[in-house]
Amino acid sequence: MKDYTKFMQWALFTITDRKTQDDRKSKIRVEALFSSPWQRDYYDCPNKEYKHYMLPVDELGRFEQFYNFVQDINAEHGYYSISHLNDGDFTDYELQKFRHMLDLWTDTKIKHRN
């Protein structure tokens, strides 16, 4: 069978919060796949009230790990423990990219709504 998604390298996704999960881990929910990030401009998201993120498909797992790591920090240290982000096993590139996506600069509070 032919793989029709092999050229779809970008994923548009939301996060399902850990409060609703049995294993207490947040999960990525892929909403659409694109061959380039610019195609998102032509996609009409059905759930506009939720925050959507866009990443290359091969970075989704690391982003999910980072997101859960931030929530673990918040549970253990509170929202103003930004210095603990460096304690994770993330490269500088991943740390800066994911912090930018989640807007984590002065605190670790994740904004779930647009």
Image (cartoon, rainbow, N blue to C red):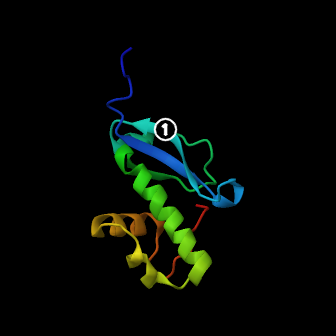
Instruction: Name the one closer to the observer, 56 or 69.
Output: 69
- Going 61% across and 76% down the picture, which residue do you hit? 75
Dividing the picture into quadrants, the one containing residue 11 is: top left
Q: How many marks overall?
A: 1
| 63 on left or right of 6 | right
| 78 on left or right of 100 | right
Q: Is residue 38 above or below residue 99?
A: above
Q: Percent from the top left, x then y, of residue 89?
A: 37, 68
Q: Which amino acid does label 1 sit on?
A: Ala
- Going 37% across and 22% down the picture, which residue do you hit? 3
Quarter of the N terminus within the rendering: top left
Instruction: Name the one closer to the observer, 84 or 10.
Output: 84
Dividing the picture into quadrants, the one containing residue 50 is: bottom right
- Going 42% across and 50% down the picture, which residue do you hit? 60
Q: Mark 1 points at which residue?
A: 32
Is residue 43 visible in the rendered image? The answer is no
Q: Residues within 10 Å of mark 1 (few under 14, many from 20)?
A: some
- Going 40% across and 64% down the picture, which residue do you hit? 98
Residue that lies at the very extreme toward the top in this rendered image: 1
Q: Is residue 74 above or below residue 55?
A: below
Q: Is residue 18 above or below residue 57?
A: below
Instruction: Name the one closer to the observer, 50 or 92.
Output: 92
| 86 on left or right of 114 | left
Residue that lies at the very extreme toward the front in this rendered image: 23
Q: Percent from the top left, x then y, of residue 48?
A: 60, 50
Disc 1 element: strand
Q: Percent from the top left, x then y, of residue 93?
A: 28, 65
Instruction: Name the one closer to the observer, 52 or 77.
Output: 77
Is residue 80 visible in the rendered image? The answer is yes
Q: Is residue 55 above or below residue 43?
A: below
